Amino acid sequence: MSQYILKIDCSDEKGLIYRIADVIYKNDLNIEKNSEFVDEENKKFFFRARIIGNVDTVTLKHELKAILPEDVNIYLHARHAKNIVLMATRESHCLGDILLKNYSGELFANVQAVISNHDTLRELSEKFGIPYFYVSAENIDRKTHEQKVLTILEEFNPDLIVLAKYMRILSSDFVRHYENRIINIHHSFLPAFIGANPYKQAYQRGVKIIGATAHFVNDNLDEGPIIAQDVIHVNHEYDWKAMQLAGRNVEKVVLSNALDLALEDRIFIYGNRTIIF
């Protein structure tokens, strides 16, 4: 028996769960686990189920579409390990964490490659047997640099791109190639502390909370739909270097959690929000 992930969003109506379950039952399939949510303000229905059986995806989608509202969106795919490409610059903590999880079998994914605008992390990546592509951004314009990166990405055609502290702003044209498929991680000091060494700025202001945010990348810098966030408390005993170390630990955890959610197809993107099951 195979496992499939079914995701549905549509206008809310009475009896939607019954109708969906009835179609699944009549196709001799079993719902192993399901979740649902209704946005009452906008009357929007969200449903996710893990189903098992011999699924004819074309027939099942056709039958579901016939009994659901006209604006329905249906995602139905066999549960499988997604292909991902990691992009990084010089900081190793997020990249190393993902590579280690992949090596130990904890990551439900196939890490295809690492792309970086510096050669700093080549040795780390190659220790795990992951191909490393260094694309220098020196002395070339952003469009040319991004085209070189896109050429590499086209070779792998990843399901997801993970910016593991990739410290370059992506253009709208680049993002359009992988809409809703690029995940970024950053500290949660924004917009208060912008620019170089935000942890030193935060220390000088005496902040008491350090956090991180993982989100999908869109045309608005660091304002895409949020997937996961977390915070930890700090106090006056932390200097800026200790705060930075603590912040990096939070970034690793938040990015890892966000990636797991995406790999398991638990995320609905709804406007600039996410619905997560």
Image: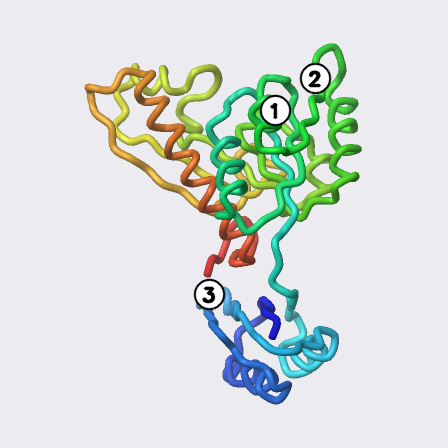
- Asked if labels 2 and 3 touch by Cβ distance under 8 angstroms, the answer is no
Distance between mark 2 and mark 1 Cα atoms: 10 Å
Quarter of the image for the N terminus: give it.
bottom right
Q: Which residue is mark 2?
A: 137
Secondary structure of residue under mark 1? loop
Q: Earlier in the sequence, mark 2 or mark 1?
A: 2
Q: Amino acid at mark 1?
A: Arg
- Residue 153 at x, y percent in the picture: 74, 37
Q: Earlier in the sequence, mark 1 or mark 3?
A: 3
Q: Which residue is mark 3?
A: 39
Q: Amino acid at mark 2?
A: Ala
- Residue 277 at x, y percent in the picture: 46, 61
Which residue is situated farthest in the top direction here?
139
Secondary structure of residue under mark 3? strand
**Which residue shows up at 69% across the image and 22% down it?**
134
Which is nearer the eye, 150 or 143?
A: 150
Q: Amino acid at mark 3?
A: Asp
Rendered image: mark on residue 17? none
Say which quarter of the image contains residue 216. top right
Q: Which residue is mark 1?
A: 168
Distance between mark 1 and mark 3 Cα atoms: 35 Å
